[in-house]
Amino acid sequence: MATPAVWQFYLRRLHSLAGIFPIGVFLLEHFFGNAFATRGPEAYNRYVEFLLGMPYLPVLEIGLVFGPLLFHGIYGLFITAGGDAFHPAQGLGARYHNVAYLLQRITGIILLVYISYHVWNTRVQAVFFGQHVDYAYMARYLAPTYEKAVYIVGILCACYHFAHGLFNFAYKWGLTVSAKAQQAMTYASLVVFAAMSAVGIHILFSFK
Amino acid sequence: MAKNTIELKIKRQDGPNVAARWEEFSIPYKPNTNIISALMEVRRHPYTVQGQKTTPPVWDANCLEEVCGACSMIINGKVRQACSALIDHLEQPIALEPMTKFPLVRDLVVDRRRMFDALKRMHAWIPIDGTYNLGPGPRVDPNMQAGAYSLARCMTCGCCLEVCPQVTPTSKFIGAAAISQVRLFNMHPTGKMHARERLEALMGEGGLQDCGNAQNCVHACPKEIPLTESIAAMGRETTAYVLKRLFGG
């Protein structure tokens, strides 16, 4: 990697932190907020209006969402390029964390494409092309089966990448040192993955 | 059926810039043979299964009791020490390959210099000599001794680097062994005096940050060193060090 040696440690820690805050926190907010779709069109539209009426919206959107996502995604590509993602198991058998290493990189790359697509259709259209994004628009947009399939893949990737990112964060920053703590964190991250995936897919199918 | 031969497949390469080839050998069976003694038998009579005369295969070995780390190689797809790999426990034909993460010297011999360079950069020792008598070191409590002993078993054999996806022939990652040694020397009461230097080195190029959390190292380690605990422990130490440097205290 071309970054000067002295920056690598801090960039890598910043990359790890950005995945939790603000990106992970935003993901939770994004799920929770969009879950108003389960309460019907009026509730969802009120939530959208609340978001659009937020003070300092462009600053929040660029500073806390778009900017960190771009940094996390692009630096993540450099990290992926620095290792051998398709590293064989080498007689150690199929072990979860070796597979997770590969999954974290594959889901990351899929997410770069998926999030670009998602933001193009639900935000760029509104900001630059005057498209009114509300419940009716989302329901129409998400109606085709292929669109649902794309979103299911996107949701699963986002949930896994975030959940395993929690494990990675705890490991990298030294929160979980003992093998027991790391094992517990592994299970906890899988529970987070399952729970968030269920919520995400439930929201997706709430747009009718 | 009792076998009366030992079948070996060795990946041969005459030098770093020549193509590799596989050669098969068949030697008389002897009980309790390990890979090293099998290789010695091949060397005595360097003829392939096809009856063709070849050069005697070359390998590294030293202690023959799995404490020096010199004879690490890939045996039936698994990286381990040849001295402690007993023929009777292996499926035949036994495939022998050199490790892939280090520059190849010849046949099964690789140059593990990157590991020793990493130890030097990490200041992985305790300076005890001065221009005057420094006196006896502080007493170490038995619990810490036990913890340190588990880390001190590292023999720089290279297994943890061989299975690490972040260690490639071109990457600069120092690997789990050197990270664990920083933990060992930083926990020692005398070694602690140079803890800062080691942490600075550990946060340098190819340092701790390059770990990708694949956790293969701990499963490949023949000495059962808690390498992933060491990596997380150093994650904690560097976190504390950086916070201290930023905010004081």
Image (tube, coloured by chain):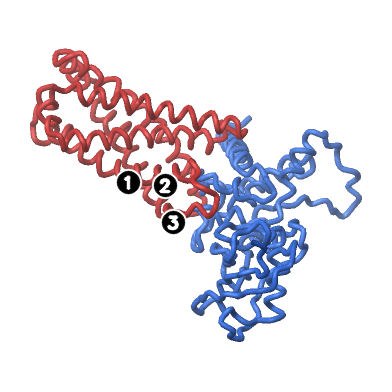
Chain colours: A red, B blue
Question: Which element is circle 3 on?
Answer: loop
Q: How far across and down, in percent of the image, does residue A70 sit?
A: 31, 42
Viewer-proximal residue, B184 or B135? B184
Identify the mark at residue A152; answer none if there is no mark. Answer: none
Query: Circles 3 and 1: CB distance less than 8 Å?
Result: no
Question: Which element is circle 2 on?
Answer: helix
Asked whether the residues under marks 3 and 1 belong to the same chain, the reply is: yes
Query: Circles 1 and 2: CB distance less than 8 Å?
Result: no
Q: Which image quadrant: the C terminus of chain B?
A: top right
Identify the mark nearer the N-term, 3 or 2: 3
Question: Which element is circle 1 on?
Answer: helix
Q: Which of the 4 image quarters holds residue A161?
A: top left
- Disc 3: CA contacts within 10 A as few (<14), some (14-19) or many (>=20): few
Mark 3, chain letter? Answer: A
Q: How far across and down, in percent of the image, does residue B19 sit?
A: 49, 78
Q: Is residue A133 visible?
A: no
Q: Which amino acid type corresponds to the residue marked 3 in the rendered image? A: Met
Q: Which amino acid type corresponds to the residue marked 2 in the rendered image? A: Leu
- At 61% across and 55% down in the image, what residue appears? B159
- Residue A111 to residue B14: above or below: above
Query: Marks 3 and 2, Cα distance to the nearest angstrom?
Result: 20 Å
Mark 3 or 1: in front is 1
Residue topped by disc 3: A1
Residue A21 shown left or right of residue B82 in the figure:
left
- Residue B176 to residue B47: above or below: above
Viewer-proximal residue, B86 or A171? B86
- Residue B111 to residue A197: above or below: below
Residue topped by disc 2: A102
Residue topped by disc 1: A109
Q: Which amino acid type corresponds to the residue marked 1 in the rendered image? A: Ile
Asked whether the residues under marks 3 and 2 belong to the same chain, the reply is: yes
Residue B2 shown left or right of residue B103 in the figure:
right
